[in-house]
Amino acid sequence: MKLSPVLIFLVIYLYASASAAAVEPREEWNLTFGGQYSDGAWCLQETEDGGNILVGNSASRGEGSDLFLIRTDNMGKCIWSQIWGGSAEDVGYFVQETRDGGFIVTGSTKSYSMGEELLWLIKTDSSGNLSWERTFGGFVSSSGDGGWSVDETDDGGYIITGYAQSLGSGRKDLWLLKTDEMGRKIWDKTFGGREDDVGMSVLQSRDGGYIVAGRTASFIRGGDDIWLLKTDSLGEEQWNRTFGGNQDDAGFQVVELADGYAVVGRTESGYDKKKIILIKVDPNGQKHWERSYEGNSASSLQTTTDGGYIIAGRIDNIDTGRDALIIKTDFAGRDEWSMILGGSADDIGTFVVSNKDGSYTMAGITDSYGQGREDAWLVKIRAESQSKENETQMRKIVFPTS
């Protein structure tokens, strides 16, 4: 059989189409945690055993808001949960499994302060029993101090970022704090100007320094700007970059890549409404590319096993209010698929992880499901390829002989 050039092109086209399989994300299970009052999850990590650890807040004890820590198995069934706090507002914003099998949590507490909130650092064992806790900050009469993100460092200690109003040069300054393995402060640094500046995400980079993402109102074109800050191992600034326009922009999470960093957030600059934004930079913070997506805000970013990205956030709907939003992209930030989750009330996605088995798990806050006013929310998602169907269709193609 001899194929004409047209038929050769058709074979190549159909083969490529069959290979580029469609992906259909679907909900595998949907679970909630909490009581009759407001509860929520702000951060999620997959544990070494394939389960989940979530941290957030709970008002279900009826004593204000408390820090809420939940461990589940791989099916989302609760193994244990812990609540810490007092009569005022306390919350956990970030959790990470540590190398000893326990967990490190950061957030803020007002119950154990003399004024407004303090940055709160908590270490537990694998069963959620308290190993130690520390508070950092000082007495202020307004917004106080708090932690948004923590990472275990190579020396067994921790690096935390957040905001400080009790020290620094402005109203709120980005706060970077290094501790030893017992949470004792080794050093801390503040960065910012006269306006509000906040660190939302921190990682130890491969060179031993630290990369921080957040927002700044001190070094801006207008409103807030997305802020990336790189330091050495002692917290000394190596470079900082801002991204944004004449409206409000904010960065929420940063990841390190083989050739730089990526940061996700929200932007109001250059668009007629809020959008999700993903920016890729080189090791010196110079922008490679940026992508925007339909959605009002994104708070979570992770790389995936195929070299792409998975993003969690929210999208506003006229009929149902706020819904959770998951976006999967390729390595260049091009949208591969997206999924809206939620019901008839307000729901938001706060964090998503790419699991070892190829699935995804999202944490958030839901008012559509559960038993309370708001509940901590955990959803397992499978994104399955339709390649087998395409391969079957390919086999059915019959070419004329000549």
Image: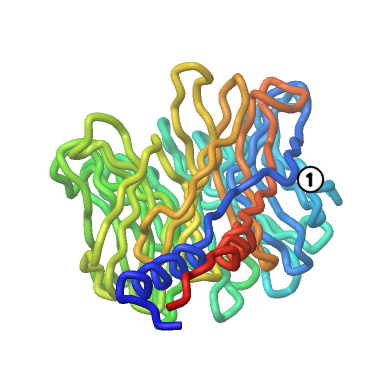
Asked if 249 appears above or below 356 in the picture, the reply is: above
Asked if 162 appears above or below 10 in the picture, the reply is: above
Q: Position of residue 346 (x, y in %)?
A: 56, 24
Which residue is pictured at 50% across the width and 34% down the height?
116
Asked whether the viewer can see residue 159, the reply is no
Q: Position of residue 339 (x, y in %)?
A: 53, 42
Which type of secondary structure does the marked residue at label 1 adopt?
A: strand
Asked whether the viewer can see residue 64, the reply is yes
Which residue is pictured at 80% across the width and 46% down the height?
81
In-image side of 64 versus 74 (left or right): left
Asked if 136 appears above or below 322 in the picture, the reply is: below
**Residue nearest the observer in this picture, 389 or 341:** 389
Q: Position of residue 221 (x, y in %)?
A: 13, 44
Which residue is pictured at 36% across the width and 57% down the height?
334
In-image side of 379 versus 387 (left or right): right
Which residue is pictured at 51% across the width and 40% down the height?
325
Amino acid under disc 1: Gln
The total number of labels drawn is: 1
**Residue assigned mark 1:** 82
In-image side of 207 versus 76 (left or right): left
Q: Position of residue 60 (x, y in %)?
A: 75, 27
In-image side of 4 versus 117 (left or right): left
Q: Quadrant of residue 235?
A: bottom left
Residue that protrudes farthest toward the front in the picture:
402
